[in-house]
Image: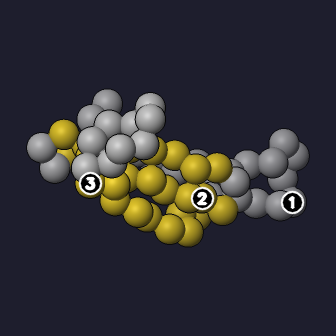
Amino acid sequence: MAPDDALSSHVAPLRLQFAQGSHLPGFGQDGLFISEHGSWNRKPLNGYRGIYVQFSQGKPVG
């Protein structure tokens, strides 16, 4: 089975936060915020980002 959202090398998710019924502008009603920790010893730097995964009917979209 292929992952819905793959992480690149030297990246680790630090926190997952579901946003159910979110009223944040630019984001859907249901989704998942993921903060990632990257690698400090890579050039260019890798990771260190936050992503949002939209959900519909309990499953990731896109």
Residue 8, percent from left and from top: 58, 48
Q: Are marks 1 and 2 in contact (CB under 8 Å)?
A: no
- The answer to whether any part of residue 26 appears in the image is yes
Is 51 on the left-hand or right-hand side of 32?
A: right
Q: Pointer 3: what residue?
A: 20
Q: CA distance from mark 3 to mark 2?
A: 20 Å
The residue drawn where x is 27% and y is 42% is: 29
- Badge 3 element: strand
Q: Pointer 2: what residue?
A: 36
* Number of numbered tags placed on the structure image: 3
The residue drawn where x is 83% and y is 61% is: 40
- Category of crowding for the residue at label 2, using alpha-carbon neighbours closer than 10 angstroms: few (below 14), some (14–19), many (at least 20): some
Report the front residue among 20 and 32.
20
Q: Amino acid at mark 1?
A: Asn
> Which mark sits nearer the N-terminus, 1 or 2?
2
Q: Pointer 1: what residue?
A: 41
Residue 37, percent from left and from top: 66, 62
- In this view, the mark in front (1 or 3): 3
Is 37 on the left-hand or right-hand side of 7?
A: right
Q: CA distance from mark 1 to mark 3?
A: 36 Å
- The answer to whether any part of residue 31 appears in the image is no
Report the front residue among 20 and 61.
20
- In this view, the mark in front (1 or 2): 2
Report the front residue among 33 and 14.
33
Residue 35, percent from left and from top: 56, 58
Q: Are marks 1 and 3 in contact (CB under 8 Å)?
A: no
